[in-house]
Amino acid sequence: MKAHQSVAPDPKGAIPTERTITRRAFCRISALSLLALSPLTGCARTESHGDPGTYYLSRQSTFLETLDSFSPHMESLLLPHYGGRFGESVIRETRAEFRGLLTGIPFIGGDENGLTEDLVQAAMVLSFYRVMRRRRRPLDEVGRLVFEAYERLLGEYPGFLFRLGWSWSGRRNNREAAAVSQQRRFPGDWVSRYVEGSGNDCDWGIDHLECGIVKYLRQQEAPELTPYCCLMDLPTFSKAGAGLTRMMTIASGSDHCDFRFKSGAPTRLLDPWSVATLERWGKLPR
């Protein structure tokens, strides 16, 4: 769902190794405001993968905290259409569903791999989808609710901190991260390649040749949900001022996802499925 990103040097002098910065990390950075740089160092731990057998359960409280920060926005969107009792029960059941899914999330390196949190977030979306599907709510409605709740969550945090986090990204580190992914150490992981830009159409890019979320949601028999997860890149990279252009995704039938970044450019998701869906929702950037 995203390109690899590197992190800032520790203000105390230690220089962390290559890592990815996730959406949750951006939110954590923003919430800490004046201490914005210190969480970046914490996100850069690479000394341990964690135990594949216990990794997700050992971090259950942290992942539930992330879900809980998202839930009030979802509940506020459900309230006008379905009433408070409906929303409360959906949120409660989503939390229980997510706890049940934790042990089945593929291990892709634990704390060493920032895309682990993308898989966790996909499990959160899947949990909500299953709960709403039991209530016979349509997929597109679920996808739009998740998208709008995520927009509201991002709206709580100042954009300059997101841009600051993105500004620390480096081409060399992204190239290295893509090379590591090609070792295919974990079957459920992403596999990526770095793309050098010309400076005209883009500065640099990342192609995802394999997508962990596509694999996971296929395994969970919910591949139809995957393109909706991809849509979350629009508010994420817009907030970061990353200048993303994406023409295709694996989730919508292409053989790879193409992320291209150009400083100062708007964020655009131009694959036909994303364009049609965002236009239908009235979310297409003008």
Image (tube, rainbow, N blue to C red):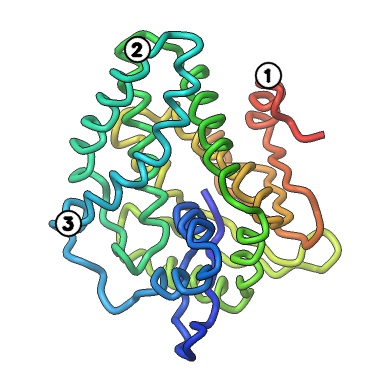
Location of mark 1 (residue): 280
User: Residue most toward the right?
Assistant: 200
- Quarter occupied by residue 14: bottom left
Q: Residue at x 58, y 48 (%)?
A: 257
Q: CA distance from mark 3 to mark 2?
A: 31 Å
Q: CA distance from mark 3 to mark 1?
A: 41 Å
Q: Are marks 3 and 2 in contact (CB under 8 Å)?
A: no
Q: Amino acid at mark 3?
A: Ser
- As helix, strand or loop, the secondary structure at mark 1 comes to helix
Give x and y (percent) for residue 225. 44, 29
Location of mark 2 (residue): 86
- Quarter occupied by residue 283: top right
Give x and y (percent) for residue 163. 66, 61
Image: 266 above or below 176: above
Image quadrant where one finds the C terminus: top right
Q: Amino acid at mark 1?
A: Arg
- As helix, strand or loop, the secondary structure at mark 3 comes to helix
Q: Is residue 232 left or right of residue 44?
A: right
Q: Amino acid at mark 2?
A: Phe
User: 83 and 99: which one is in front?
Assistant: 83
